[in-house]
Image: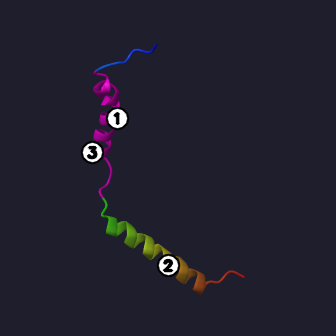
Amino acid sequence: MAQKQKGGGFHSSAGLMRYFDEEESKGPKLDHRLVIGLGIAAMVIIELAKWRWPVS
């Protein structure tokens, strides 16, 4: 029968906690409205380019 381990929760999640600590400290902080706005602007530019220079 398998024995039940007690007190292993912290040790098993230590690597995961370290990963999330590192993730939060690096990388650019972008506002969600900026990302959505850039996506909409890209769609508009692509649609205008398709209208201006149609592909036959």
Is 18 magenta? The answer is yes
The C terminus - image quarter: bottom right
Check residue 25 in the rendering and tell me which mark sits there, or answer none. 3
| Distance between mark 3 and mark 1 Cα atoms | 15 Å
Secondary element at image label 2: helix
Is 30 magenta? The answer is no
User: Label 3 sits on what residue type?
Assistant: Ser
Residue hosting label 2? 45
Up the image or down, 34 lies above or below 19; here it is below
- Badge 3: how crowded within 10 Å, few (<14), some, or many (20+)? few
- Badge 1: how crowded within 10 Å, few (<14), some, or many (20+)? few
From this viewpoint, which residue is outermost toward the front? 1
Return the disc, 3 or 1, that comes first in the chain's sequence.
1
Residue 14 place in picture, x, y as percent: 30, 29
Who's the residue at 30% across and 20% down the image? 6
Return the disc, 3 or 2, that comes first in the chain's sequence.
3
User: Label 1 sits on what residue type?
Assistant: Leu
From this viewpoint, which residue is outermost toward the right? 56
| Distance between mark 2 and mark 1 Cα atoms | 41 Å
Check residue 16 in the rendering and tell me which mark sits there, or answer none. 1
User: Label 2 sits on what residue type?
Assistant: Ile
Are the residues flagged by discs 2 and 1 in contact, CB closer than 8 Å? no
Q: What's drawn in magenta, residue-wise?
A: 7-29
Q: Which mark's residue is nearer the viewer, 2 or 1? A: 1
Residue 23 place in picture, x, y as percent: 32, 43
Q: Main secondary structure of the magenta part?
A: helix
Question: What colour scheme has been applied to the protein in the rendered image?
Answer: rainbow
| Distance between mark 3 and mark 2 Cα atoms | 34 Å
Return the disc, 2 or 1, that comes first in the chain's sequence.
1
